Image (tube, coloured by chain):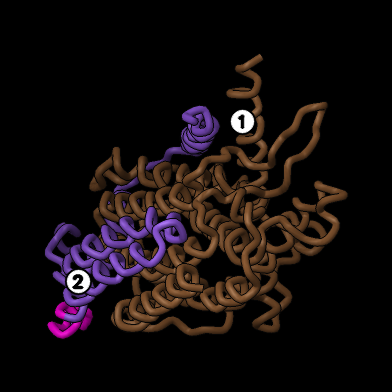
Chain colours: A brown, B purple
């Protein structure tokens, strides 16, 4: 009986989650292309099936059947390991994010989270940070000047923006007083309203660090297609390129999921107590809204210069997030 | 308590399995037509000059070192953030002293143009 609870149910949940994430990724690319098209007053993809809904499937099939090129001048082990090291942690981000309340399925209480651990936020940070290794190792192994520069830029950018992000997260954690994401969605003791409003002030800054951490436009320095061809993935083709592409979008989904959980109440919404299944839809809708923000930013803000990016982080975001955290600490402890 | 982490282990296997299967399937299904042109590094169509692993700006290194300094600081803050209410004023003052000491280093780095790209 025990192995059902310990192994089988988590295994089913993980497989379902991975399948949902991968489908989500595929249609996220469609969503983005369609939206960017609209932003630029084009129609966007519309050839395969209705509204171009067949494009993601066609893309996936094409990627699988492309020739695998592992050039002889690369570090072959790292070259193949790079995409795998990038995709696996990206999938693991969602392991601790609660996507809905506890459901009653087949007479069993099933919480809609793979692992309800008490270090949820730390797990997300750690695993999201591991994604950098995949990119840096891939860029290094490629032995291509563009790839190496892209990898170096990625490492500096992700390291720098992790600081303000971490400090803003500490401010949020000060308010909630726990690292467990389930308890953040449904707090044991109610959070006073002024702290709830105060947290929302951190969101714009947190969103900027999210853009930089996921390497999205306007901070897409890992790729910078008009300076570095395709950045760290210049030498990659076929499924390996697809895996890197997936990683980027999974990071967007993961970052959105975390932001929704921390700032906007996760799966909570009206009537969730009566119909727990609604929680899933609320969560999906909130994540979709967050993803829309990502695409909106990429469609409207031009890319800064690389030194501007780093200076903005260290001399503006970092001090301001420290001040924000200090004020939060005083608010939490003294009031 | 450790049981709570077992699902994470299970999911690690699933995620790693997906990466391995994806790489394997493509390696099996894709065609293989090697030729010398495919085997040169892509440099916008020019014949590549030398190895890619040459010297790169020291600034990347400076940023990484600074990151390690401040990241340790941030990591120390997590346990405090969770327990801040219990620690109360004492914890707040202790943390303030700790942050001020690190801020001195930050300002020193800033004044020495660590964040300026030469």
The magenta-colored residue range is B108-117
Is A276 magenta? The answer is no
Q: Position of residue A155 (x, y in %)?
A: 30, 62
Query: In which image quadrant can residue B45 be found?
Result: bottom left
Residue at the disc numbered 2: B101
Few, some or many residues within 10 Å of mark 2 (<14, 14–19, 20+): few
Cα distance, mark 1 to mark 2?
45 Å
| Residue A104 in sight | yes
Toward the viewer: A173 or A9?
A: A173
Parent chain of label 2? B
Residue at the disc numbered 1: A10
| Residue A156 in sight | no
Determine whether A99 is above or below A15 in the image: below
Query: In which image quadrant can residue A256 be found?
Result: bottom right
Residue in the image at 44% along x and 50% along y? A122
Q: Position of residue A62 (x, y in %)?
A: 59, 48
Determine whether A141 is above or below A309 in the image: above
């Amino acid at each position: 009986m025990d192995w059902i609870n310990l192994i089988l149910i988590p295994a089913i949940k993980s497989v379902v989650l991975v399948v949902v994430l991968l489908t989500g990724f595929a249609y996220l690319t469609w969503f983005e292309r369609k939206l960017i098209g609209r932003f630029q007053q084009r129609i966007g993809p519309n050839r395969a099936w209705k509204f171009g809904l067949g494009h993601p499937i066609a893309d996936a099939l094409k990627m699988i059947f492309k020739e695998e090129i592992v050039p002889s001048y690369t570090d072959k082990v790292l070259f193949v390991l790079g995409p795998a090291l990038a995709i696996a942690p990206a999938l693991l981000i969602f392991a601790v994010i609660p996507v809905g309340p506890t459901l009653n399925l087949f007479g069993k209480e099933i919480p809609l989270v793979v692992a309800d651990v008490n270090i949820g936020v730390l797990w997300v940070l750690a695993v999201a940070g591991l994604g950098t290794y995949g990119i840096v190792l891939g860029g290094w192994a490629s032995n291509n000047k563009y790839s190496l520069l892209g990898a170096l830029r990625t490492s500096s950018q992700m390291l720098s923006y992790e600081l303000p992000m971490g400090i803003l997260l500490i401010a949020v954690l000060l308010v909630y007083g726990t690292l467990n994401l389930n308890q953040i969605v449904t707090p044991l003791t109610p959070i006073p309203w002024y702290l709830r409003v105060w947290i929302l002030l951190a969101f714009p800054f947190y969103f900027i660090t999210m853009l930089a951490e996921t390497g999205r436009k306007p901070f897409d320095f890992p790729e910078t297609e008009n300076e570095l061809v395709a950045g760290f993935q210049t030498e990659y083709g076929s499924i390996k390129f697809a895996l890197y592409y997936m990683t980027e979008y999974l990071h967007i989904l993961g970052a959105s999921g975390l932001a929704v959980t921390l700032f906007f109440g996760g799966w909570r919404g009206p009537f969730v107590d009566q119909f727990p299944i609604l929680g899933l839809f609320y969560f999906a809708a909130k994540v979709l809204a967050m993803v829309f923000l990502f695409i909106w930013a990429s469609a409207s803000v031009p890319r800064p210069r690389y030194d501007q990016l780093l200076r903005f982080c260290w001399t503006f975001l970092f001090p301001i997030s420290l001040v924000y955290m200090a004020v939060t600490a005083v608010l939490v402890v003294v009031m | 308590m450790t049981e709570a982490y077992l699902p994470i282990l299970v999911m690690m296997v699933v995620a790693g399995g997906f990466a391995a299967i994806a790489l394997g399937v493509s390696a099996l299904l894709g065609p293989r037509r090697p030729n010398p042109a495919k085997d040169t590094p892509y440099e916008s169509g020019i014949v590549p000059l030398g190895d890619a692993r040459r010297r790169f700006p020291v600034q990347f290194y400076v940023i990484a070192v600074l990151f390690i300094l401040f990241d340790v600081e941030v990591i120390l803050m997590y346990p405090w953030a969770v327990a801040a209410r219990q620690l109360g004023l004492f914890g707040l003052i202790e943390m303030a002293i700790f942050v001020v000491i690190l801020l001195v280093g930050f300002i020193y780095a800033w004044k020495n143009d660590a964040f300026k790209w030469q």
